[in-house]
Image (cartoon, helix red, strand yellow):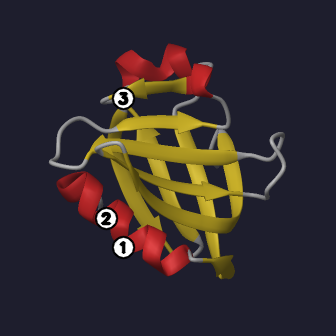
Amino acid sequence: MADITVKAAYGSVVEDEGQLFVGFAEGEDEADGYVLFRQPVGGGPVWFEASDETFGAEDAIESIVEGPKGYEVTIRPDKRATFGFAATVAVRVGQGCEDGPEALAALKAMVGALWR
């Protein structure tokens, strides 16, 4: 079982000021859980955060494993303190997740070989 779970109702892909943002959120309220991935448009290190930018870091992803209910992010051991010592973040992306397929495709392209 994951240390943090986000049940995504929305997915998004946004390009802004030379950065590509891919996110999944439980809702539209500021207090709702989310995950966010950010990378320069031309490639480079990926920033990952979970529900608050203080729980985020660059180059923190060890792997992302796809499963029947979504995917699970494993955080690199040397970055876990930044995430409140969480080792894994599960993102549940059901069929009702608005823009979920587009966001998943963009995330897979962003993280490349980290996706399994």
The structure residue drawn at horizontal position 39% and vertical position 22%, both measured from the top left corner, is 77
Q: Name the residue under label 3.
A: 76
Q: What amino acid is labelled 1 in the image? A: Ala
Say which element carries label 3: loop
Seen as rendered, the residue at the extreme bottom is 95
Count of numbered tags: 3
State the separation of the CA atoms marked 3 and 1.
23 Å
Seen from the viewer's position, the closer of residues 106 and 14 is 14
Nearer mark to the viewer, of 2 and 3: 2
Q: What amino acid is labelled 2 in the image? A: Lys
Residue 2, given in percent of the width and then of the height, sits at 62, 46
Query: Which label sits on residue 30?
Result: none
Question: Image height check: is 60 above or below 29?
Answer: above
The structure residue drawn at horizontal position 39% and vertical position 42%, both measured from the top left corner, is 38
**Within the image, what quadrant is residue 37 found in?**
top left
> Mark 3 or 1 closer to N-term?
3
Image quadrant holding the C terminus, namely bottom left
The structure residue drawn at horizontal position 18% and vertical position 38%, both measured from the top left corner, is 44
Question: Image height check: is 17 above or below 24?
Answer: above
Say which element carries label 2: helix
State the separation of the CA atoms marked 2 and 3.
18 Å
Say which element carries label 1: helix
Query: Which label sits on residue 108?
Result: 2
Nearer mark to the viewer, of 3 and 1: 1
Residue 112, given in percent of the width and then of the height, sits at 20, 58
Q: Name the residue under label 1.
A: 105
